[in-house]
């Protein structure tokens, strides 16, 4: 570029397409290039533009999609992701071509997102694992590569400036800063470039990480990070959650659930209890609202496993969301008239039993005391490990 520019040949023209801000490294090489470089930003699509895309698709297929506004937002600026979500929605509704009579599609967006995520998991799980574990997994370490990938998922843009991210996350300044400053990240990326460059770009000169594939970014942003960290070998690393406890119960046990909610709340424990959240759920897609809470946004799931629990539609949905968390994050409360059978998944973890023939209030107090002790121990451990 510099040599061609110095020739002052009007017929010479060069256009370089690359990652936003990567041109900074060119300027470091030659300062006089600064006035000769222009960055053309390809901004994410606006929700209204994606909405128009979906509307055009509705017209072609003769459909009415109830959740097109939600899809426009869930696509996060990517036309491609919007198309993937709409395709999955059509498949779930049994639509594969234009229909003669206008058809209304009311499939849950949360279900669609989960299905798309599971499909993408087959493609991206191994790539995410390779990057998150770095050159060598150290189970007692602070997992700097895992945190870098997590920061990428939380960033509003497709690129992450590591220098700024490190300053914004002082708890991990030592661990992440070390692998960046010593060039370990650069060496690791170079070694695994053939695998990683399909979805991740890293510029060691500017310390910028960019995502090459919108599907991979969608995958990261919809990942259960606590579950992922355990799967790849970091059982002691956890990410912040919105609630300490989420209650899952059949309607017949609401009295017990209500007592637990009041007692736990009085101990300054953050509890997700549907009745208390009713004003937030109003006008929301209930499945879309509840799904993330039971999958990852609550530290523990407290399951009131009564004889009515397996018979209810909503408890079935909730249990489907936390089925991967039976490794220390689900606390079953068994009722004495519905003890777990040999093949009941709750039987493999430690839990508490309620004797239905005795006063519930005293037993609720005991349950709350046990949970308070459990949370206290977990929080102490988190502070010692410096967990975010």
Image (tube, grey):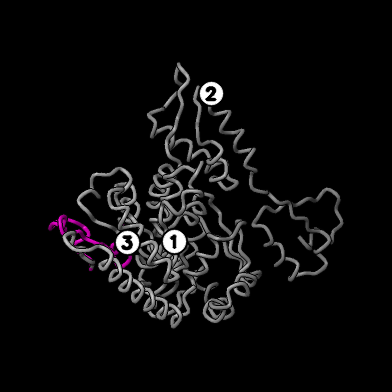
The x, y position of residue 50, in whole percent, is: 60, 38
| Span of residues in magenta | 324-350
Would you call the spot at circle 2 few (<14 residues within 10 Å), some (14-19), or many (20 or more)?
few
Residue occupying image coordinates x 44% and y 65%: 270
Which residue is under mark 2?
60
Tell me which corner region of the image, top left, top right, bottom left or bottom right, holds residue 243: bottom left
User: Which sits in the foreground, 104 or 23?
Assistant: 104
Identify the residue at image location x=38%, y=49%. Answer: 118
Give me the C-alpha separation between circle 3 and circle 2: 47 Å
Decide: few, some or many residues near mark 3? Use Cα within 10 Å; few <14, some 14-19, many ≥20.
Answer: many
Q: Quote the CA–CA distance across marks 2 and 1.
A: 37 Å
Please give the residue where the numbered disc 3 appears in the rendered image. 302
Looking at the rendered structure, the number of numbered marks drawn on it comes to 3
Find disc 1 in the rendering and name its residue: 128
Tell me the distance, in whole angstroms, between the alpha carbons under discs 3 and 1. 30 Å
Residue at the farthest left position: 342
Dot 1: element: helix
Label 3: which secondary element? strand
Q: Residue at x 52, y 43 (%)?
A: 81
Measured from the top left, where is residue 35 in percent x and y?
84, 61
């Amino acid at each position: 570029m510099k040599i061609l520019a110095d020739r002052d040949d009007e017929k010479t023209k060069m256009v370089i397409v690359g990652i936003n801000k990567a041109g900074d490294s060119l300027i470091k090489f030659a300062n006089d290039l600064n006035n000769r470089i222009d960055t053309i930003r390809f901004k994410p699509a606006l929700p209204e533009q994606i909405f128009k895309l979906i509307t055009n698709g509705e017209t072609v297929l003769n459909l009415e999609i109830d959740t097109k506004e939600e899809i426009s937002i869930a696509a996060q600026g990517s036309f491609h992701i919007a198309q993937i979500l709409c395709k999955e929605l059509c498949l779930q509704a049994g639509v594969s071509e234009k229909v003669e009579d206008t058809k209304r599609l009311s499939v849950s967006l949360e279900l669609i997102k989960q299905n798309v995520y599971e499909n993408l998991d087959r493609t991206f799980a191994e790539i995410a694992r390779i990057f998150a574990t770095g050159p060598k997994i150290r189970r007692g370490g602070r997992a700097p590569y895992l945190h870098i990938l997590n920061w990428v998922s939380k960033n509003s843009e497709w690129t992450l400036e590591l220098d700024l991210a490190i300053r914004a996350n002082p708890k991990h300044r030592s661990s992440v800063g070390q692998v960046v400053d010593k060039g370990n990240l650069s060496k690791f990326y170079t070694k695994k470039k053939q695998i990683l460059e399909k979805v991740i770009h890293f510029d060691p000169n500017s310390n910028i990480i960019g995502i090459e594939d919108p599907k991979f970014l969608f995958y990261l942003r919809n990942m259960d990070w606590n579950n992922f960290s355990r799967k790849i070998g970091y059982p002691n690393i956890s990410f912040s959650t919105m609630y300490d406890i989420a209650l899952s119960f059949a309607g017949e046990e609401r009295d017990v659930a209500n007592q637990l909610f009041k007692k736990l709340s009085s101990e300054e424990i953050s509890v997700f209890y549907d009745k208390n959240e009713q004003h937030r759920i109003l006008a929301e897609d209930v499945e879309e609202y509840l799904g993330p809470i039971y999958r990852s946004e609550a530290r523990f799931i407290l399951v009131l496993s009564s004889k009515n629990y397996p018979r209810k539609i909503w408890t079935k949905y909730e249990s489907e969301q936390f089925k991967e968390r039976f490794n220390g994050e689900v606390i079953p409360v068994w009722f004495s008239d519905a003890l777990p059978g040999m093949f009941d998944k709750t039987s493999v973890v430690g839990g508490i039993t309620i004797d239905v023939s005795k006063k519930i209030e005293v037993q609720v107090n005991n349950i709350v005391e046990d949970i308070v002790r459990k949370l206290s121990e977990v929080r102490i451990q988190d502070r010692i490990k410096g967990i975010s």
